[in-house]
Image (cartoon, rainbow, N blue to C red):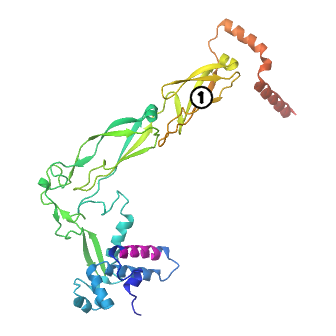
Amino acid sequence: MAKRDYYDVLGASKGASADELKKAFRKKVKELHPDQNQDNPNAEAQFKDVNEAYDILKDANKRAAYDRFGHAAFEGGTGASAGGGGGFHPGARQGGGDFASAFSDVFDDLFGDFMGGGGRRNAGPRGAARGADLRYNLRVSLEDAYHGKAATITVPGSTACDKCNGTGAEGGAEPTTCPTCSGMGKVRAQQGFFTVERTCPTCSGRGQVIKNPCGACAGAGRVQRDRTLSVNVPKGVETGTRIRLAGEGEAGLRGGPSGDLYIFIEVREHGIFQRDGQNLYCRIPVPMATAALGGKLEAPTLDGGRSRVDVPAGVQSGKQLRLRGKGMPALRGSQFGDMYIELAVETPVNLTARQRELLREFEELSKDNNPEGSDFFSRVRKFWDGMKG
């Protein structure tokens, strides 16, 4: 059976650019992966065909040979020689092409942004590595969360080495290409019908080596040093709010980009106010006489002010009064939440003899002035009578 045209296998045109070929390959890989096509007996064979096609077409020399001679360029070695491609070894392509080589490019694109992010695209110079992200827990008061503040923090971590300018080489010299892997960062070994690709043991996958490491940083290009940073804590933050400072994390390895610093906010509990989102709650005790007769009280607000509140006569414990716009500011926007005052009717203690006498007289005169209590005990008596019956 004649082999299908490689361009047809990938679903790409013959004049497609390298990026277009890669996009077509990625699409086919997702579409035909055997794990997602267990009910399709042909999926595995098609998957191998896609990898074989991309392995040829991604290489400029191989693609030129294929465009000129077709599949004959890779059969028996004669076509490759005629096409001037060089380096083509049919024995190394058993089982549908060099799968590891073909798939590695797409793997970096699909998953390179995880675990520190960026992959090769954001790694900076060859042999460099992105610095790790850092986390800093910052505790602020509720007043700071209300008004906002500029905080100064000290962050332990690594910074670029001043002596070698972050290159890791003495005197700031540039690293040299690794002689073992020729700068690829990987070495290949033939094992029977398979080509095994491993990280280069000489350069640890960086593709470069430093002949004369910097004495200050031991070739890492970074040193441990505490840094003092100013952080703007915006109004309205709450516990769990995250602030990102780009490029303020660990310094990159050998000139690589720095990681990011993530500041996690924790708002301390307050002695007067409790917070729920943008709303504030304040529990205020009210004298028993004021609760019975009604009156006024002064309620504190988080901005440092005072608000006069009318207490209605006969108010009960747990009654909430709302002060509009006296809550927390929104993190993004100009709106404010509300403040809720919960009244707690306070029973007097340490009474004098005269006070006791007056309260007993008041109790006798107010037996019919407690409707809620009268109704409750009436229902209790019915309950007890029902139990006896």
Percent position (x, y) of residue 218? 17, 52
User: Which secondary structure lies at badge 1?
Assistant: strand
- Residue 301 vertical placement versus 204 (above, below): above
Look at mark 1 in the image and give the residue it sits on: 341
Q: Residue at x 33, y 60 (%)?
A: 118
- Of residue 300 and residue 199, the one placed in the foreground of this image is 300
Quarter of image, res 99: bottom left
Percent position (x, y) of residue 4? 40, 88
Q: Residue furthest top?
A: 354
Q: Is residue 22 magenta?
A: yes
Label 1 Cα crowd, 10 Å radius (few <14 / some 14-19 / many 20+): many
Percent position (x, y) of residue 190? 26, 79
- Of residue 240 and residue 381, the one placed in the foreground of this image is 240
Quarter of image, res 120: bottom left
Q: Which residues are drawn in magenta?
A: 20-34
- Of residue 49 and residue 39, the one placed in the foreground of this image is 49
Q: Residue at x 76, y 22 (%)?
A: 370
- Residue 215 vertical placement versus 189 (above, below): above
User: Where the C terminus falls, by quadrant?
Assistant: top right
Q: Amino acid at mark 1?
A: Ile
- Residue 115 vertical placement versus 382 (above, below): below
Most common secondary structure along the magenta stretch: helix
- Residue 310 vertical placement versus 180 (above, below): above
